[in-house]
Image: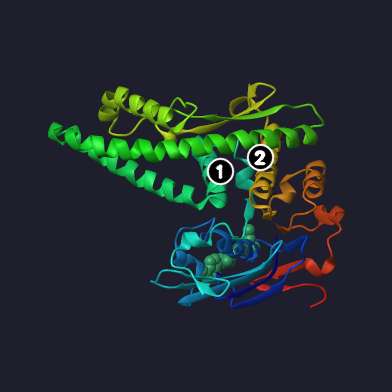
Amino acid sequence: MYLKSLKLINFRNYNQLALEFHPKINVFVGENAQGKTNILEAIYLTSTAKSFRTSKDRELIKFDKDRAYIKVEGKKRYTDTTVELKLEEGKKKQIKLNGMTLSKNSELLNNVYVVVFSPEDLKLIKEGPSERRKFIDNEIAQMKPSYFHHLNRYNKVLMQRNNLIKKIYHNKKLMDTLDIWNEKLIELGTKLMMERERFVTRINLLSRLIHRKITENKENLEVRYMSSIELKNDFKDTLESFRKTLQEALDVDLQRGTTTFGPHRDDLGVFVNGIDIRSFGSQGQQRTCALSLKLAEIELIKGETAEYPILLLDDVMSELDIKRQTFLIKALKDVQIFITTTEMNHLNELNVNKEYIFHVKNAVVYNESM
Ligand SMILES: Nc1ncnc2c1ncn2[C@@H]1O[C@H](COP(=O)(O)OP(=O)(O)O)[C@@H](O)[C@H]1O
Ligand SMILES: [Mg+2]
């Protein structure tokens, strides 16, 4: 799919903005703090109803205003789609999909598909496990909104179980109520783990092929789902395995006042030619692996939804050498890409249509033909 247009009113530092996009490459160039990422953020919001930078809607509304508006028009294989968001201070955001107001934000998912690639993502491999869990969760949720719902419920149940465990330490009588929370935790947790396992298996196959191409057959990439619970072939057995681990860990949990095992402790193992690249990879290797994973994610979304997602490259091109840049653009010839950069020089090879090089200066956007 691709986006045809974007409209903003009072969003971040913009008063009003109306842009038409190219179905392939669009570049936003300008100095820091001018409003480039704000545009990508607005696009991302029309996909997930959330920002990739803040959880506070207030921050999205222009400082001196009390409401903001975002609209995109997109083209999909068989249909067009319009998404509108209205943000108002102190109110729930209002979302319209093709003119119809949604009753829940999650109904927006599975419509506009977006993949973001930022310098933080380049660090995905060397960061801690929580970043890699976030990567897995976001990708699954985008294709499967019910996953997002289960994840939220799991996190709530986990918090409640942790609170209870801290209280039990002082008041043993509360032990009776623990079972209820345990059962909820293992049921939701098993759903998450099985979904994650399925996702990682597929991303492994796709990223392996891509990684071979980028490294000219020198490196064999393998990603593995590393769960703190022993996974079995079916739901019931995995549920049982989680239950058993919880029981065995009860004393440790009570001592530490927290839940030691479960999907909130999972990780994604990343291996190159059998070596754990999280600890032993060079920076270059770690970055190439991150790139392979991101590209695999794009193929996966295409496979699941029959639509290519839109790719947002926030300040990431200048971090890649020419070889990787060229590979990226070539591999994505059917994908609409939005690039932000402070420097046009290193993008010369891409031959971007001048009309779609947008200069961004203090929330004013112009191109050479404007
Ligand atoms: N709610 C807001 N109202 C007005 N300006 C904002 C708001 N949020 C951020 N900004 C401004 O937006 C600018 C940052 O925009 P951003 O898109 O991140 O810049 P960059 O061009 O470096 O990507 C900063 O000048 C910041 O002060
Ligand atoms: Mg930026």
Instruction: Name the disc covering residue 293, or none.
Output: 2
Q: Closer to the N terminus: mark 2 or mark 1?
A: 1
Q: Residue at x 41, y 38 (%)?
A: 189
Q: For disc 2, does the CB lie below 8 Å from ligand 2?
A: no
Q: Residues at badges 2 and 1 in contact (C-beta under 8 Å)? A: yes
Q: Residue at x 30, y 35 (%)?
A: 182
Q: Secondary structure at mark 1?
A: helix
Q: Residues within 10 Å of mark 1 (few under 14, many from 20)?
A: some
Ligand 2 placement by image quarter = bottom right
Q: Is residue 155 above or below residue 277?
A: below
Q: Amino acid at mark 2?
A: Leu
Query: Where does the image place residue 280, in percent across and percent down from the top left?
Result: 63, 25
Q: Residue at x 67, y 76 (%)?
A: 18
Which quadrant holds residue 111?
bottom right
Instruction: Name the disc covering residue 287, or none.
Output: none
Q: Is residue 347 above or below residue 123?
A: below
Q: Is residue 128 above or below residue 17?
A: above
Tell me if I can see residue 341 in this picture: no
Q: Residues within 10 Å of mark 2 (few under 14, many from 20)?
A: many
Q: Amino acid at mark 1?
A: Phe
> Is 50 placed left or right of 38 in the picture?
left
> Is 24 placed left or right of 116 in the picture?
right
> Is 253 placed left or right of 140 in the picture?
left
Depth check: 343 or 249 in front? 249
Q: Secondary structure at mark 2?
A: helix
Which quadrant holds residue 29?
bottom right
Query: Where does the image place residue 333, in percent across and percent down from the top left?
Result: 80, 52
Q: For disc 1, does the CB lie below 8 Å from ligand 2?
A: no
Q: State the CA–CA distance, disc 2 to disc 1.
A: 10 Å
Instruction: Name the disc covering residue 135, or none.
Output: 1
